[in-house]
Amino acid sequence: MMRSHWSFFQIMGTLVLLVIMLLCEVCLGGVQFVGKVYPGSIKGAQMNWVDKDGKFLASSSGKFTFGFATTADDNTKFLVVIVHVKSNTLIWTANRAVPVVNTDEFEFDEEGNVVLNKGETVVWSTNTSGKGVSSMELQDNGNLVLLGKDNTTIIWQSFNYPTNTLVQGQNFTEGMKLISDPSPNNLTYSLEFNSGDVKLYAGFKTPQPYWSTQSDNRMIINQNGGVVALATLAEKSWRFYDKTRALLRQFIFVNLSGNNGTWVAVLGSNGLITFFDLEAGGSNSPSQATIPQGSCNTPETCDPYSICTGNNKCNCPSVLPCKPGFDSACSDKSITLMKGDYGLNYVALQFLKPFSKTNLEGCQKSCNGNCSCLAMFFHLSSGNCFLLDDIGSFQKPGTDSGYVSYIKISSDGRGSSNGGSGGGSSNKHTIVTVIIVIVTLLVISCLIFVGIRCYRRKPNVPESQEENSEEDNFLENLTGMPIRYSYKDLEAATNHFSVKLGQGGFGSVYKGVLPDRTQVAVKQLEGIGQGKKEFRSEVSIIGSIHHLHLVKLRGFCVEGTHRLLAYEYMANGSLDKWIFKKNNGEFRLDWDTRFNIALGTAKGLAYLHEDCDSKIIHCDIKPENVLLDDHFMAKVSDFGLAKLMNREQSHVFTTLRGTRGYLAPEWITNYAISEKSDVYSYGMVLLEIIAGRKNYDPSETSEKSHFPSYAMKMMEEGKLREILDSELKEDVNDERVHIAIKVALWCIQEDMAMRPSMTKVVQMLEGLCTVPKPPTSSANLGSRLFTNVFSLSEGATTSSGPSDCNSDAYLSAVRLSGPR
Ligand SMILES: *[C@@H]1O[C@H](CO)[C@@H](O)[C@H](O)[C@H]1NC(C)=O
Ligand SMILES: *[C@@H]1O[C@H](CO)[C@@H](O)[C@H](O)[C@H]1NC(C)=O
Ligand SMILES: *[C@@H]1O[C@H](CO)[C@@H](O)[C@H](O)[C@H]1NC(C)=O
Ligand SMILES: *[C@@H]1O[C@H](CO)[C@@H](O)[C@H](O)[C@H]1NC(C)=O
Ligand SMILES: *[C@@H]1O[C@H](CO)[C@@H](O)[C@H](O)[C@H]1NC(C)=O
Ligand SMILES: *[C@@H]1O[C@H](CO)[C@@H](O)[C@H](O)[C@H]1NC(C)=O
Ligand SMILES: *[C@@H]1O[C@H](CO)[C@@H](O)[C@H](O)[C@H]1NC(C)=O
């Protein structure tokens, strides 16, 4: 008995020892080398060096280290990098495009080759097998070198393969490139040698240069002309040399005296090169000087087709709502060449060779006849014609650029209703001119007519003459403004407010017919406590917004205490009438229509968020505020109204009673309200469109009463059929159903940073980019907050963050309102 006991303990002891030995082997992998290492000495994955933060080699002074680091946006993916330790700045990356995981191995093998594997495949290698490598050294300047037998010959060095950073002392020579990380629009920039100069390029289909050392008037010229063969950072300047190492010109990026520091130049994803001192705060304290200088000098200071007007201010061109979004200039859609705004310039023009030297017609003709031409610039005095197959933002210089610009626009939808016909033949051209002249004359006479009417009406209005004329002038000076009506006009139009269309959050809506027989919906705003001036300026903002998927404001009335808005009439009313079972008996919408409504709504919101001069957060997205015209096209209504509300508006909480199910959690917590709050509400609406039921329905079983949680659960279990409206069963295999469900679940993520932008939502719904599987873990928290919203009682305290909406009002309303 005793014997067998002992042997049991012996066995256990051996096992424990084995485990300890195994652990130790892992520990041994964790040695961090310093300075030089020899072939065969390094082999391991990130987890072998966890306690060294993944770094397996340090430079002799410890200033730089070499090893694994996580990528910026995913801490389960790893890059092999050289890091400046003090500032934690990456100066070089081996496998930028292909991150690995924490079990993938890096090796400096016996043959002298350095490889990084991802599973079985090599993702990066120095390709130095059998080249006589005797050691690898991380030098104190941040250069990783493979040395030959004599300890001095450099067989390979990281300085020859820069990523987006140049370090002081690093030679940038012909054949090398700096490539930036991609911008939000997936554009990369590069710094390259080309025809004897160093230039910056934007990585369009055809790369477009936007800076060269010769074009920068801040350069200190040492020797005119010359062929640049080498560039290097030294002593606070960037120096450009020729083949014989004669200094041609230099750019002094900082005027500090004293300590030399360790400067680096980084090509950012915004297309700018910035300089900063690694010893003094790294990227947190860049130099004032950037390359290129100032705003508007990169192709994507603003969105494509937008106009950049100094101080990085972006405007939409007048001929199209900012993003035209056509795929190809040669699709079946009809394409027209529209004249761009006056005096525009484009940053690449000064570097491009003209396509031809011709006259304006010739230039238009070559653009019209060329599928890949998206924009065209014609230099009036020289006759140079430039065709561009891709375009970033335009520049609007203070003085006339001397160019006339044309952009191709597809004339089907996308708001470019100015359609018209192309400027191809001169015959067509004349017709277009005649039409434009006639339309202009008509518009002018209309304005005069309206002006006279207003003038005549004045005595009827019990207000001071002066103020009125000031107002009228104000309005007439703004083109495309909604018309100002008198209260009498609207009273007559609505037949004394007899046909009530609905009761919205801001007041009642009545059907009306204007004298010109157009139908309108007149909204009688209640409890708008704002003064006339504020009201007018808000209305002028709302009225200047035109988009296919936004309800158009036709006119308004501000008289005494009356505040009315006249909108275009939407024959099919609001979305809630068409998707919920409660309104049964009636015909409910098929999947195609629902999808188009969801997409249209998203486009409308994306426009409000991203394409307007002043960003507009809707703050009250719900099915009641999505209106349908007679073709069931969706238009968002009531945008901009949140701003009209006063702090203590008791009416707001009437609104919120019907709306609370759509409010983002940050309304209740004290985070700032942003456009992402609209994204949340949109996601809730989208879910209701898909499911054909209210998101919160106490009459359902407890599992299903809070539908978002239920949908997330079903998504996790792969039961999409359970999410889709039971009346749409046959559509469950439609790809768009899957997309829409995933998009909705992304939009209602509790963490606002996880929610996509509305533009992204549009792209996902249109199938332009893939939709990853939404994370479902926040489901519970979501329902907790949701129930909170419904059970907030008088005592609950909330505080408001800064926001564009009148958040105080909303939040205090949430606080005040009792249970539903
Ligand atoms: C090594 O060779 C492969 C294949 O020839 C090549 O793709 C890779 O860029 C090379 N690596 C380096 C660091 O030159
Ligand atoms: C190279 O360096 C190693 C170690 O530092 C030394 O043993 C070797 O003799 C050196 N070789 C030459 C050629 O200097
Ligand atoms: C840079 O080039 C100069 C001259 O060609 C050379 O002396 C120097 O060693 C080079 N520096 C590096 C780090 O390669
Ligand atoms: C960005 O562009 C690259 C290459 O041009 C492409 O492979 C990649 O899919 C694009 N990514 C996105 C998010 O569009
Ligand atoms: C450095 O000083 C010169 C002369 O005072 C000035 O022209 C230049 O703009 C300054 N450069 C920087 C980067 O501040
Ligand atoms: C800065 O660098 C230059 C050249 O390397 C050197 O002559 C000068 O003494 C340095 N200045 C300081 C303050 O270190
Ligand atoms: C079409 O335009 C592109 C530039 O946008 C130009 O590179 C190309 O040569 C043109 N093709 C023809 C056939 O003119």
Image (spheres, rainbow, N blue to C red):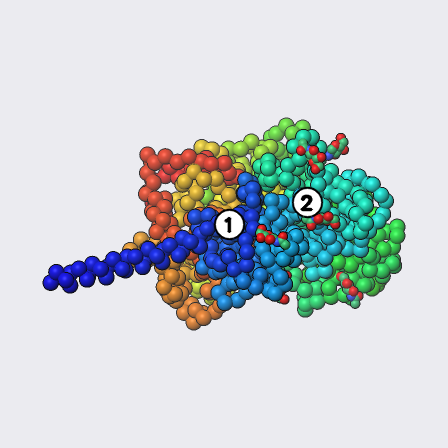
Q: Amino acid at mark 2?
A: Gly
Q: Image point 82% across, 57% down: which residue?
A: 353
- Identify the amino acid type marked 1: Phe
Residue depicted at x 65% and y 40%: 263
Q: Nearer the viewer, residue 287 or 210?
A: 287
Q: Position of residue 320 (x, y in %)?
A: 68, 53
Is 482 or 623 nearer to us in this picture? 623
Q: In the figure, is residue 267 to the left or right of 649?
A: right
User: Looking at mark 2, is its residue's CB closer than 8 Å to ligand 3?
Assistant: yes
Q: Assess mark 1: CB under 8 A from ligand 2?
A: no
Q: Quadrant of the C terminus?
A: top left
Residue position for label 1:
33
SS at circle 2? loop
Residue 409 left/right relative to 140:
right
Location of mark 2 (residue): 169
Crowd tier of the residue under label 2, counting other residues whose Cα lies within 10 Å: few below 14, some 14–19, many 20 or above: some
Q: Which mark is residue 675?
A: none
Label 1, secondary structure: give it: strand
